[in-house]
Amino acid sequence: MPNAPKTSRTPPADSPPTLPVVSSTRSPLSAAADDTPARLIDVQSVAARFLAEAAPAAAAATSLVPLETSAHRLSTTRAAAYLHNGWKPQRQKLLDAMIAGNVADSRIRRFCTCGDAAQVEVHEETGRLRIRTGGCNDRCCIVCGRRRALLVEAALNGLLCTRPVHAYTFATLTIAGKPNVPLADSVSRLYDGFRDLRRLKLWKKNVHGGIAVCEIKWSDRANAWHPHLHLLMDARYVEQAAISDHWRAVTGDSFRVDLRRVRGNQRAASYLSKYVTKPISNTCLGTAPLAAEAVAALKGRRLAFCFGAWYGTPLSKLAESDEVPDEAPELWRPVAALQDLLTAADGGDEWARSLVRDLPHRQRSDSGPAG
Ligand SMILES: [Zn+2]
Protein backbone atom coordinates (compact mmCIF):
# COMPACT_ATOMS: atom_id res chain seq x y z
CA MET A 1 0.00 0.00 0.00
CA PRO A 2 1.69 3.26 -1.07
CA ASN A 3 2.44 5.96 1.45
CA ALA A 4 0.60 9.24 1.36
CA PRO A 5 2.83 12.27 0.82
CA LYS A 6 4.62 13.07 4.06
CA THR A 7 3.63 16.72 3.92
CA SER A 8 -0.05 16.01 3.65
CA ARG A 9 -2.01 16.09 6.89
CA THR A 10 -5.34 15.23 5.30
CA PRO A 11 -5.31 12.01 3.31
CA PRO A 12 -7.55 11.58 0.30
CA ALA A 13 -10.84 9.99 1.15
CA ASP A 14 -9.93 6.72 -0.56
CA SER A 15 -6.43 6.39 0.85
CA PRO A 16 -5.33 4.89 4.15
CA PRO A 17 -4.97 7.35 7.02
CA THR A 18 -1.65 9.07 7.48
CA LEU A 19 -0.48 10.12 10.88
CA PRO A 20 1.27 13.43 11.40
CA VAL A 21 4.96 13.13 10.65
CA VAL A 22 7.75 14.25 12.95
CA SER A 23 11.29 14.74 11.81
CA SER A 24 12.89 12.99 14.77
CA THR A 25 13.77 9.35 14.30
CA ARG A 26 12.65 8.77 17.87
CA SER A 27 9.07 8.11 18.65
CA PRO A 28 7.44 11.39 19.60
CA LEU A 29 5.97 9.70 22.62
CA SER A 30 9.33 8.32 23.71
CA ALA A 31 10.67 11.84 23.42
CA ALA A 32 7.70 13.05 25.35
CA ALA A 33 8.71 10.88 28.25
CA ASP A 34 11.73 13.14 28.81
CA ASP A 35 9.95 16.38 28.13
CA THR A 36 7.67 18.69 29.97
CA PRO A 37 3.95 18.18 30.30
CA ALA A 38 3.55 20.96 27.71
CA ARG A 39 5.34 18.77 25.17
CA LEU A 40 3.01 15.92 26.01
CA ILE A 41 -0.01 18.07 25.50
CA ASP A 42 1.40 19.02 22.12
CA VAL A 43 1.77 15.35 21.18
CA GLN A 44 -1.75 14.69 22.26
CA SER A 45 -3.17 17.60 20.32
CA VAL A 46 -1.40 16.42 17.17
CA ALA A 47 -2.75 12.95 17.76
CA ALA A 48 -6.21 14.38 18.31
CA ARG A 49 -6.02 16.19 14.97
CA PHE A 50 -4.99 12.95 13.32
CA LEU A 51 -7.96 11.22 14.84
CA ALA A 52 -10.37 13.89 13.68
CA GLU A 53 -9.02 13.86 10.15
CA ALA A 54 -8.03 10.28 9.54
CA ALA A 55 -10.36 8.19 11.62
CA PRO A 56 -13.30 8.32 9.20
CA ALA A 57 -11.01 7.26 6.36
CA ALA A 58 -9.52 4.53 8.53
CA ALA A 59 -12.94 3.21 9.36
CA ALA A 60 -13.82 3.11 5.68
CA ALA A 61 -10.54 1.51 4.72
CA THR A 62 -10.71 -1.29 7.24
CA SER A 63 -13.01 -4.24 7.33
CA LEU A 64 -14.81 -3.84 10.62
CA VAL A 65 -17.37 -6.59 10.68
CA PRO A 66 -20.85 -5.34 11.51
CA LEU A 67 -22.10 -6.89 14.71
CA GLU A 68 -25.38 -7.93 13.14
CA THR A 69 -23.62 -10.12 10.59
CA SER A 70 -20.79 -11.38 12.80
CA ALA A 71 -22.75 -12.76 15.73
CA HIS A 72 -21.06 -15.92 16.96
CA ARG A 73 -17.98 -15.25 14.88
CA LEU A 74 -14.73 -13.87 16.18
CA SER A 75 -14.07 -10.33 15.05
CA THR A 76 -11.52 -10.03 12.27
CA THR A 77 -10.52 -6.42 12.87
CA ARG A 78 -6.83 -5.58 12.81
CA ALA A 79 -6.99 -4.49 16.46
CA ALA A 80 -8.59 -7.73 17.61
CA ALA A 81 -6.13 -9.81 15.60
CA TYR A 82 -3.24 -7.89 17.18
CA LEU A 83 -4.50 -8.24 20.74
CA HIS A 84 -5.56 -11.87 20.48
CA ASN A 85 -2.59 -13.07 18.49
CA GLY A 86 -1.17 -16.24 20.01
CA TRP A 87 -4.32 -17.94 21.21
CA LYS A 88 -6.58 -17.91 18.16
CA PRO A 89 -7.23 -21.69 18.06
CA GLN A 90 -8.10 -21.82 21.76
CA ARG A 91 -10.25 -18.71 21.43
CA GLN A 92 -12.23 -20.30 18.61
CA LYS A 93 -12.68 -23.47 20.66
CA LEU A 94 -13.95 -21.47 23.61
CA LEU A 95 -16.36 -19.62 21.32
CA ASP A 96 -17.63 -22.94 20.00
CA ALA A 97 -18.01 -24.12 23.59
CA MET A 98 -19.99 -21.02 24.51
CA ILE A 99 -22.33 -21.53 21.57
CA ALA A 100 -22.77 -25.22 22.39
CA GLY A 101 -23.24 -24.37 26.06
CA ASN A 102 -26.11 -21.97 25.29
CA VAL A 103 -24.31 -19.00 26.75
CA ALA A 104 -26.22 -15.72 26.42
CA ASP A 105 -25.87 -14.00 23.05
CA SER A 106 -24.80 -10.75 24.72
CA ARG A 107 -21.88 -12.50 26.42
CA ILE A 108 -20.83 -14.20 23.20
CA ARG A 109 -20.93 -10.89 21.33
CA ARG A 110 -18.72 -9.24 23.92
CA PHE A 111 -16.29 -12.16 23.72
CA CYS A 112 -16.21 -12.04 19.91
CA THR A 113 -15.59 -8.29 19.72
CA CYS A 114 -13.09 -8.02 22.58
CA GLY A 115 -10.43 -5.50 21.55
CA ASP A 116 -12.27 -3.91 18.62
CA ALA A 117 -12.62 -0.66 20.52
CA ALA A 118 -9.10 -0.67 21.96
CA GLN A 119 -7.46 2.71 22.37
CA VAL A 120 -3.80 3.62 22.64
CA GLU A 121 -3.20 5.97 25.53
CA VAL A 122 -0.19 7.84 26.88
CA HIS A 123 0.55 8.44 30.55
CA GLU A 124 0.71 12.18 31.06
CA GLU A 125 3.56 11.99 33.58
CA THR A 126 5.78 9.18 32.29
CA GLY A 127 5.02 9.14 28.57
CA ARG A 128 4.45 5.40 28.81
CA LEU A 129 2.03 3.93 26.30
CA ARG A 130 -0.68 1.43 27.04
CA ILE A 131 -3.52 -0.21 25.20
CA ARG A 132 -6.86 0.28 26.84
CA THR A 133 -8.63 -2.74 25.47
CA GLY A 134 -12.19 -1.99 26.50
CA GLY A 135 -12.21 -5.76 26.77
CA CYS A 136 -15.00 -8.24 27.23
CA ASN A 137 -13.95 -9.14 30.81
CA ASP A 138 -15.11 -12.66 30.07
CA ARG A 139 -13.69 -15.35 32.35
CA CYS A 140 -12.78 -17.37 29.25
CA CYS A 141 -10.87 -14.52 27.56
CA ILE A 142 -7.14 -14.83 28.06
CA VAL A 143 -6.44 -11.22 27.08
CA CYS A 144 -8.82 -9.93 29.74
CA GLY A 145 -7.71 -12.68 32.11
CA ARG A 146 -4.13 -11.47 31.90
CA ARG A 147 -5.15 -7.99 32.97
CA ARG A 148 -7.16 -9.40 35.83
CA ALA A 149 -4.31 -11.71 36.85
CA LEU A 150 -1.76 -8.90 36.97
CA LEU A 151 -4.00 -6.84 39.20
CA VAL A 152 -4.55 -9.85 41.45
CA GLU A 153 -0.80 -10.45 41.48
CA ALA A 154 -0.10 -6.85 42.50
CA ALA A 155 -2.71 -6.94 45.27
CA LEU A 156 -1.41 -10.30 46.41
CA ASN A 157 2.14 -8.98 46.58
CA GLY A 158 0.91 -6.11 48.71
CA LEU A 159 -0.70 -8.54 51.11
CA LEU A 160 2.12 -11.09 51.21
CA CYS A 161 4.80 -8.56 52.08
CA THR A 162 3.11 -7.90 55.43
CA ARG A 163 4.27 -11.28 56.76
CA PRO A 164 7.50 -13.31 56.54
CA VAL A 165 7.67 -15.67 53.61
CA HIS A 166 7.65 -18.79 55.77
CA ALA A 167 4.13 -17.89 56.87
CA TYR A 168 2.65 -18.95 53.55
CA THR A 169 1.63 -22.28 52.10
CA PHE A 170 0.44 -23.48 48.73
CA ALA A 171 -2.22 -26.16 48.71
CA THR A 172 -4.10 -27.92 45.95
CA LEU A 173 -7.38 -29.67 46.65
CA THR A 174 -8.73 -32.10 44.09
CA ILE A 175 -11.91 -34.09 43.72
CA ALA A 176 -11.33 -37.72 42.75
CA GLY A 177 -12.29 -38.14 39.12
CA LYS A 178 -14.89 -40.72 38.21
CA PRO A 179 -16.10 -41.53 34.69
CA ASN A 180 -19.58 -40.35 33.77
CA VAL A 181 -19.80 -37.88 36.65
CA PRO A 182 -20.86 -34.47 35.29
CA LEU A 183 -18.37 -31.69 35.85
CA ALA A 184 -21.01 -29.50 37.52
CA ASP A 185 -21.44 -32.17 40.21
CA SER A 186 -17.68 -32.45 40.76
CA VAL A 187 -17.33 -28.66 41.00
CA SER A 188 -20.17 -28.53 43.54
CA ARG A 189 -18.47 -31.20 45.62
CA LEU A 190 -15.18 -29.33 45.42
CA TYR A 191 -16.66 -26.03 46.59
CA ASP A 192 -18.89 -27.68 49.23
CA GLY A 193 -15.97 -29.75 50.48
CA PHE A 194 -13.74 -26.71 50.82
CA ARG A 195 -16.49 -24.85 52.71
CA ASP A 196 -16.83 -27.82 55.10
CA LEU A 197 -13.05 -28.12 55.47
CA ARG A 198 -12.86 -24.49 56.60
CA ARG A 199 -15.33 -25.25 59.38
CA LEU A 200 -13.15 -27.96 60.92
CA LYS A 201 -11.14 -27.30 64.07
CA LEU A 202 -7.82 -28.22 62.46
CA TRP A 203 -8.35 -25.64 59.75
CA LYS A 204 -9.60 -22.87 62.00
CA LYS A 205 -6.69 -23.39 64.38
CA ASN A 206 -3.96 -23.29 61.75
CA VAL A 207 -5.15 -21.27 58.76
CA HIS A 208 -5.39 -17.52 59.18
CA GLY A 209 -6.59 -16.58 55.69
CA GLY A 210 -5.96 -17.10 52.01
CA ILE A 211 -7.12 -17.06 48.42
CA ALA A 212 -8.53 -19.92 46.35
CA VAL A 213 -8.55 -20.15 42.54
CA CYS A 214 -10.43 -22.80 40.57
CA GLU A 215 -8.96 -24.72 37.65
CA ILE A 216 -10.82 -27.23 35.49
CA LYS A 217 -8.88 -30.16 34.07
CA TRP A 218 -9.84 -33.26 32.14
CA SER A 219 -7.92 -36.53 32.46
CA ASP A 220 -7.92 -38.76 29.39
CA ARG A 221 -6.31 -41.52 31.42
CA ALA A 222 -9.08 -41.53 34.03
CA ASN A 223 -11.72 -40.47 31.52
CA ALA A 224 -12.96 -38.05 34.14
CA TRP A 225 -12.99 -34.42 35.28
CA HIS A 226 -10.48 -33.17 37.83
CA PRO A 227 -11.51 -29.78 39.16
CA HIS A 228 -8.89 -28.21 41.44
CA LEU A 229 -8.78 -25.43 43.97
CA HIS A 230 -5.35 -23.82 44.16
CA LEU A 231 -4.84 -22.15 47.53
CA LEU A 232 -2.28 -19.66 48.77
CA MET A 233 -2.74 -19.15 52.47
CA ASP A 234 -1.26 -17.71 55.61
CA ALA A 235 -1.06 -20.84 57.72
CA ARG A 236 0.94 -22.66 60.35
CA TYR A 237 2.68 -25.87 59.36
CA VAL A 238 0.21 -28.72 59.16
CA GLU A 239 1.03 -32.35 58.37
CA GLN A 240 -0.08 -33.23 54.86
CA ALA A 241 -1.56 -36.48 56.16
CA ALA A 242 -3.78 -34.56 58.57
CA ILE A 243 -5.16 -32.28 55.86
CA SER A 244 -5.56 -35.26 53.54
CA ASP A 245 -7.57 -37.15 56.18
CA HIS A 246 -9.81 -34.15 56.76
CA TRP A 247 -10.30 -33.67 53.01
CA ARG A 248 -11.39 -37.27 52.71
CA ALA A 249 -13.74 -36.79 55.66
CA VAL A 250 -15.57 -33.87 54.07
CA THR A 251 -15.63 -35.20 50.50
CA GLY A 252 -16.16 -38.87 51.25
CA ASP A 253 -13.72 -40.18 48.66
CA SER A 254 -11.07 -37.59 47.82
CA PHE A 255 -7.80 -37.40 49.67
CA ARG A 256 -5.32 -35.90 47.21
CA VAL A 257 -3.92 -32.74 48.77
CA ASP A 258 -0.68 -31.14 47.71
CA LEU A 259 0.97 -28.90 50.33
CA ARG A 260 4.10 -26.82 49.81
CA ARG A 261 5.67 -24.00 51.76
CA VAL A 262 6.18 -20.78 49.81
CA ARG A 263 9.81 -19.94 49.11
CA GLY A 264 9.42 -16.46 47.65
CA ASN A 265 6.53 -14.05 47.91
CA GLN A 266 6.77 -12.66 44.39
CA ARG A 267 7.01 -16.09 42.82
CA ALA A 268 4.08 -17.20 44.92
CA ALA A 269 1.92 -14.30 43.77
CA SER A 270 2.87 -14.91 40.14
CA TYR A 271 2.26 -18.65 40.41
CA LEU A 272 -1.17 -18.29 41.96
CA SER A 273 -2.35 -15.50 39.67
CA LYS A 274 -1.61 -17.51 36.53
CA TYR A 275 -4.64 -19.63 37.36
CA VAL A 276 -6.73 -16.46 37.32
CA THR A 277 -5.81 -16.03 33.65
CA LYS A 278 -7.07 -19.36 32.51
CA PRO A 279 -9.61 -21.31 34.56
CA ILE A 280 -10.25 -23.90 31.84
CA SER A 281 -7.22 -26.03 31.04
CA ASN A 282 -6.26 -26.95 27.47
CA THR A 283 -6.83 -30.58 28.50
CA CYS A 284 -10.51 -30.25 27.63
CA LEU A 285 -10.48 -27.63 24.86
CA GLY A 286 -9.65 -30.17 22.16
CA THR A 287 -12.95 -32.01 22.59
CA ALA A 288 -15.95 -29.82 21.84
CA PRO A 289 -18.47 -31.47 24.21
CA LEU A 290 -15.96 -31.33 27.09
CA ALA A 291 -15.20 -27.67 26.46
CA ALA A 292 -18.92 -26.87 26.33
CA GLU A 293 -19.46 -28.71 29.61
CA ALA A 294 -16.61 -26.79 31.24
CA VAL A 295 -18.00 -23.41 30.16
CA ALA A 296 -21.48 -24.37 31.37
CA ALA A 297 -20.28 -25.78 34.70
CA LEU A 298 -18.45 -22.57 35.60
CA LYS A 299 -21.44 -20.35 34.90
CA GLY A 300 -22.26 -18.36 38.03
CA ARG A 301 -19.29 -19.76 39.95
CA ARG A 302 -16.76 -17.57 41.66
CA LEU A 303 -13.52 -18.69 40.10
CA ALA A 304 -11.38 -16.93 42.69
CA PHE A 305 -12.22 -15.91 46.22
CA CYS A 306 -10.63 -15.12 49.56
CA PHE A 307 -11.34 -16.81 52.84
CA GLY A 308 -10.60 -16.28 56.52
CA ALA A 309 -8.89 -13.02 57.41
CA TRP A 310 -8.28 -12.25 53.74
CA TYR A 311 -11.98 -12.01 53.06
CA GLY A 312 -13.01 -8.39 52.52
CA THR A 313 -9.50 -7.17 51.62
CA PRO A 314 -8.88 -5.28 48.34
CA LEU A 315 -7.53 -8.58 46.98
CA SER A 316 -10.80 -10.25 47.87
CA LYS A 317 -12.90 -7.69 46.01
CA LEU A 318 -10.64 -7.89 42.98
CA ALA A 319 -10.56 -11.69 42.90
CA GLU A 320 -14.29 -12.14 43.20
CA SER A 321 -15.31 -9.78 40.42
CA ASP A 322 -15.21 -10.50 36.71
CA GLU A 323 -14.82 -6.77 36.09
CA VAL A 324 -11.29 -5.48 35.61
CA PRO A 325 -10.94 -2.02 37.14
CA ASP A 326 -8.92 0.75 35.56
CA GLU A 327 -6.05 2.34 37.44
CA ALA A 328 -5.93 6.13 37.70
CA PRO A 329 -7.75 6.69 34.39
CA GLU A 330 -7.39 10.45 34.81
CA LEU A 331 -3.63 10.16 34.17
CA TRP A 332 -4.01 8.60 30.74
CA ARG A 333 -4.65 10.60 27.57
CA PRO A 334 -6.00 9.12 24.31
CA VAL A 335 -3.59 8.96 21.39
CA ALA A 336 -5.41 6.94 18.72
CA ALA A 337 -7.70 4.01 18.21
CA LEU A 338 -5.53 0.89 18.01
CA GLN A 339 -7.35 -0.07 14.82
CA ASP A 340 -6.44 3.25 13.14
CA LEU A 341 -2.87 3.15 14.38
CA LEU A 342 -2.23 -0.38 13.13
CA THR A 343 -3.87 0.37 9.78
CA ALA A 344 -1.69 3.44 9.32
CA ALA A 345 1.42 1.49 10.35
CA ASP A 346 0.53 -1.27 7.91
CA GLY A 347 0.27 1.43 5.24
CA GLY A 348 3.85 2.47 5.91
CA ASP A 349 3.38 5.56 8.03
CA GLU A 350 6.61 5.96 9.98
CA TRP A 351 5.12 7.71 12.98
CA ALA A 352 2.43 5.09 13.33
CA ARG A 353 5.11 2.42 13.06
CA SER A 354 7.18 4.08 15.76
CA LEU A 355 4.16 4.21 18.03
CA VAL A 356 3.38 0.56 17.41
CA ARG A 357 7.01 -0.29 18.21
CA ASP A 358 6.65 1.59 21.49
CA LEU A 359 3.53 -0.28 22.51
CA PRO A 360 3.98 -2.67 25.39
CA HIS A 361 4.73 -6.17 24.22
CA ARG A 362 1.62 -7.81 22.89
CA GLN A 363 1.54 -10.27 25.76
CA ARG A 364 1.71 -7.42 28.19
CA SER A 365 -0.21 -4.83 26.23
CA ASP A 366 -3.46 -5.83 27.79
CA SER A 367 -1.79 -6.22 31.08
CA GLY A 368 -1.34 -2.64 31.86
CA PRO A 369 -3.90 -1.66 34.34
CA ALA A 370 -6.43 -0.64 31.78
CA GLY A 371 -10.10 -1.05 31.21
ZN1 LIG B 1 -11.64 -10.11 26.45
Image (tube, rainbow, N blue to C red):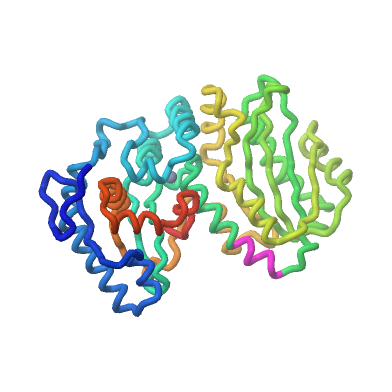
**What residue sits 20% from the left and 59% below the top?**
50
Residue 21, x across and y down, in percent: 23, 62
Range drawn in magenta: 155-162
Seen from the viewer's position, the closer of residues 365 and 173 is 365
Residue 135 placement, left or right of 152: left
Where is ligand 1, by quadrant?
A: top left
**Residue 185 shows in this picture:** yes
Residue 273, x across and y down, in percent: 61, 52
Seen from the viewer's position, the closer of residues 202 and 22 is 22
Above or below, 278 relative to 271: above
Residue 277, x across and y down, in percent: 55, 46
Q: Residue 268's quadrant in the figure?
A: bottom right
**What residue sits 31% from the left and 49% below the top?**
342
Magenta stretch, main secondary structure class: helix
**What residue sits 72% from the left and 28% below the top?**
177
Residue 201 placement, left or right of 141: right
Asked if residue 161 lies in the magenta stretch, the reply is yes
Asked if residue 270 lies in the magenta stretch, the reply is no
Q: Work out which quarter of the rendered image holds the N terminus and state it.
A: top left
Q: Work out which quarter of the rendered image holds the C terminus and state it.
A: bottom left
**Residue 205 shows in this picture:** no
**What residue sits 45% from the left and 50% below the top?**
362
Seen from the viewer's position, the closer of residues 81 and 301 is 81
Residue 292, x across and y down, in percent: 51, 27
